[in-house]
Image: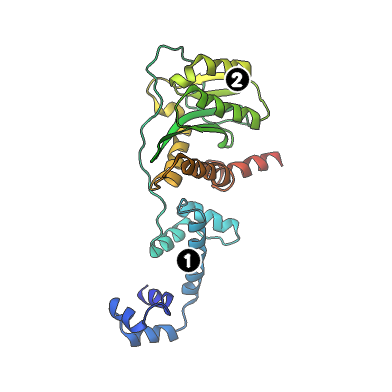
Amino acid sequence: MKYTTIQQHEGQHAISLMCRALSVSRSGYGHWKRRKPSVRAQENMQLDVKIHDVFHAQKGRAGAPRIAQVLCNQGMPVSKHRVAKRMQQQGLVAKAGRKFKATTNSKHNLPVAENLLEQNFYAAKPNQKWVSDITYIETREGWLYLAVVMDLHSRLVVGWSMSDRMSKTLVMDALKMALWRRKMPRNVIVHSDRGSQYCSHAYQRLLQKHALVCSMSKKGDCYDNAAMESWNHSLKVESIHGEHFATRAEAMAAVFEYIDIYYNRQRLHSFLGYLSPEAFEAQKVS
């Protein structure tokens, strides 16, 4: 690896200086350069370039399993274990996880709905079951709140809304987008937590107007909306954590890029057999 590092930086620094810094001899480096690399070493060099390109194209969001699948899709079959080893050799580490607290307030006297999902997050076809939640993003201007609606069939994000206020309008706008994008389906189970925004009379009237069926998690049980919690976690880890947004507009742009460009269209989902949500739905149609 030391010789490879020197070779990569030839022309930028003096070879003798780099050899001293890395505690190798100039003659040893010269001998290494003249030696023909093995077939495996050549394959690894080609693989390293491919892994590097995929890793950075996905902004460090993908780990070894997803990168291996991307390479397989590109006609370069490789195991996730070999990708993991080559990533380690290059110092490539996917963005790490971190826990985030819940956002909505369930301490209210508004009516709540029955839990119709009972932690069954499988849907045989689109527009059977949607899940929704609110999360938040810190900016120097203050909090930006994001409401999302996801179809459990394909894990496609079908509606979202952002605002500087965590209001009933926020969740209603996300639901309206979902209805519009899905061509006004009826009898969809729409599941959420017991937050006051979802229990509000205005939100409930919107559900009734479009013949949607309300479902809510049991009090204090995050597992009742686990699919949505998992999505929130992916957003924070893959797009938000480590970023410093000066304005809400900057954060909004990052969220839009994550949802509409990366997550829905490009992110390979293990639940979907390593297809993106859009590719999974397109496959079902064809």
Crowd class of label 2 (few under 14; some 14 to 19; many from 20; radius 10 Å): many
Which quadrant is the C terminus positioned in?
Answer: top right
Q: Amino acid at mark 2?
A: Leu
Mark 2–mark 1 Cα distance, whole angstroms, equals: 50 Å
Q: Is residue 182 above or below residue 207?
A: below
The x and y percentages for residue 187 are 63, 20
Identify residue for label 1: 48
Asked if one can make out residue 101 in the rendered structure from this viewpoint, the answer is yes
The x and y percentages for residue 122 are 55, 31
- Mark carried by residue 212: 2
Q: Secondary structure at mark 2?
A: loop
Q: Is residue 125 above or below residue 216?
A: below
At x 57% / y 57%, what residue is drawn? 72
- State which mark lies toward you, 2 or 1: 2
- Mark carried by residue 9: none
Crowd class of label 1 (few under 14; some 14 to 19; many from 20; radius 10 Å): some
Q: Secondary structure at mark 1?
A: helix
At x 48% / y 58%, what residue is drawn? 56
> Which sits in the foreground, 283 or 185?
185
Q: Residue 208 is drawn in which quadrant?
A: top right
At x 57% / y 42%, what residue is drawn? 260
Direction from residue 18 to residue 188 in the image, left or right: right
The x and y percentages for residue 283 are 66, 43
> Which sits in the foreground, 32 or 77?
32
At x 52% / y 24%, what residue is drawn? 169
Q: Amino acid at mark 1?
A: Asp
